[in-house]
């Protein structure tokens, strides 16, 4: 059963970085905090099945599909 945690006296800079990260990843601040805690506290990270599940979930949210030639052009961009 999940537990509720209340954090107090979070430094403004830490909160700002958490908020920016949540926006970047399109998550709530609560979800971003959980992801950050899991990344730091879960030994060895996630099992392969969990990584695959999360990758598929993220892929399902992508609206734009890039083709191989476009990806190659992005990689070369700015390298000249």
Image (cartoon, rainbow, N blue to C red):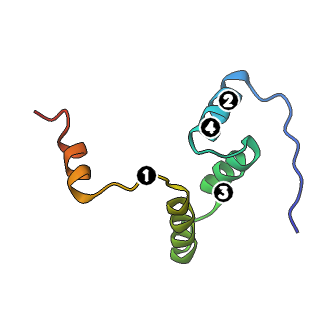
Horizontally, residue 72 falls left or right of residue 54, namely left
Of callouts 2 and 1, the N-terminal one: 2
Distance of label 3 from label 1 (alpha carbons): 29 Å
- State the mark number for residue 64: 1
| Element on which disc 4 rests | helix
Tell which circle, 2 or 4, labels the residue nearer the N-terminal end: 2
CB atoms of marks 2 and 4 within 8 Å: no
Q: Is 20 above or below relative to 49?
A: above
Which residue, given by chain and number where applicable, does mark 2 sit on? Answer: 14
User: Alpha carbon of mark 2 to alpha carbon of mark 1: how far?
Assistant: 32 Å
Locate residue 20, reporting x and y percent: 61, 32
Sequence-first disc among 2 and 3: 2
Q: From the viewer's perspective, is the residue at label 2 or at label 1 nearer?
A: 1
The answer to which of 52 and 48 lies nearer the viewer is 52
The residue wearing badge 4 is: 23
Q: Which mark is residue 38?
A: 3
Q: CA distance from mark 2 to mark 3?
A: 17 Å
Outermost residue to the top: 12
Q: Residue at x 66, y 23 (%)?
A: 13
Closer to viewer: mark 3 or mark 4: 4
Assign a secondary structure to mark 3: helix
| Mark 4 residue crowding within 10 angstroms, few (<14) / some (14–19) / many (20+) | few
């Amino acid at each position: 059963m999940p537990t509720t945690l209340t954090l107090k006296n979070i430094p403004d800079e830490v909160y700002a970085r958490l908020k920016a990260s949540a926006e970047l990843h399109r998550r709530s601040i609560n979800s971003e905090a959980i992801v950050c805690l899991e990344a730091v506290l879960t030994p060895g990270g996630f099992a392969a099945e969990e990584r695959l599940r999360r990758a598929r979930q993220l892929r399902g949210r992508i609206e734009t599909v890039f083709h191989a030639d476009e990806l190659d052009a992005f990689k070369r961009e700015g390298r000249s």
